[in-house]
């Protein structure tokens, strides 16, 4: 924090976030803005453990409790908007040991409902949201990898490809698994979801 003045200014049109960027890994780190609004130039407290940051490569997000009890969040670029819209509650509630434990579990699996249900509504919401986002991010990466990041119909690449569910979310038998996924460009994805194109039993579209 060498090019801005203390105290940090807050935006008025949406959330304000405090981020670091690691260019080699192409990962962001999010910090608790309320703890760093006032600071000494070059403050060493705005840091994250590199191993904690690396966890975000596979999980999408990672949560690291620092020695001052601040929660720093590792962020993969595709999870940036999810972090930005939830940053305040992630940092605020993440300081609580039981919530931090459940947030870390939510990155891998659905946390035990008996532990989640005793939390307040807002704490339950953020844990459920992290679990949902983590599942979706994992599904997307697996499907796009399986298809070589190419649309199954047009073969377009150029980062213009979505991971679509073959059986829609919520339908019987649907799962966030690569076997239930297909890589499609956005136009074909919308057409597929609308039932305008489909796969036959020989996997022809």
Image: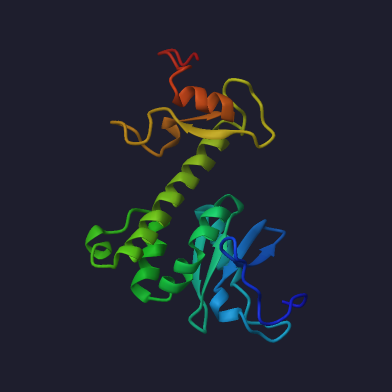
**Residue that extends furthest to the right in the rendered view of this protein:** 3
Quarter of the view holding residue 175? top left
Q: Residue furthest front?
A: 12
Which color scheme does this rendered protein use?
A: rainbow
Please determine whether, in this image, residue 138 is positioned above or below residue 163. below
In percent of width and height, residue 153 lies at 58, 20
- Residue drawn 53% across the image and 66% down it: 73
* Furthest-bottom residue in this view: 40
Figure quadrant of the N terminus: bottom right
Quarter-wise, where is residue 27 in the image?
A: bottom right
- Nearest to the observer: residue 17 or residue 31: 17
Relative to 138, residue 51 above or below: below
Residue 69 picture location, percent across and down = 48, 81
Q: Which residue is located at x 72 percent, y 59 percent?
A: 23
How many numbered marks are there?
0
Residue in view at x 51 percent, y 58 percent: 85
Q: Position of residue 125 (x, y in %)?
A: 35, 59
On the rendered structure, is 94 left or right of 42? left
Residue 96 place in picture, x, y as percent: 38, 76
On the image, which quarter does residue 15 sit in? bottom right
Q: In the drawing, does residue 72 fall left or right of residue 105?
A: right
Between 141 and 14, the residue placed more toward the observer is 14
């Amino acid at each position: 924090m060498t090019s801005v003045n203390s105290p940090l200014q807050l935006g008025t049109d949406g959330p304000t976030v405090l981020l670091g960027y690691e260019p080699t890994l192409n990962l962001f780190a999010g910090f608790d803005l309320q703890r760093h609004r006032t600071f000494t130039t070059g403050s060493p407290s705005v840091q994250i453990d590199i191993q904690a940051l690396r966890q975000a490569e596979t999980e999408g997000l990672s949560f690291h409790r620092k020695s001052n009890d601040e929660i720093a969040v590792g962020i993969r670029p595709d999870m940036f908007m999810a972090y930005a819209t939830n940053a305040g509650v992630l940092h605020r509630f993440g300081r609580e040991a039981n919530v931090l434990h459940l947030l870390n579990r939510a990155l891998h699996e659905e946390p035990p409902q008996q532990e989640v249900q005793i939390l307040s509504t807002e704490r339950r919401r953020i844990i459920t949201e992290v679990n949902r986002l983590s599942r979706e991010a994992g599904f997307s990466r697996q499907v796009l990898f399986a298809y070589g990041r190419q649309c199954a119909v047009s073969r377009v690449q150029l980062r213009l490809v979505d991971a679509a569910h073959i059986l829609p979310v919520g339908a019987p038998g649907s799962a966030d698994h690569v076997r239930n996924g297909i890589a499609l460009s956005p136009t074909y994805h919308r057409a597929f979801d609308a039932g305008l194109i489909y796969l036959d039993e020989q996997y022809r579209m």
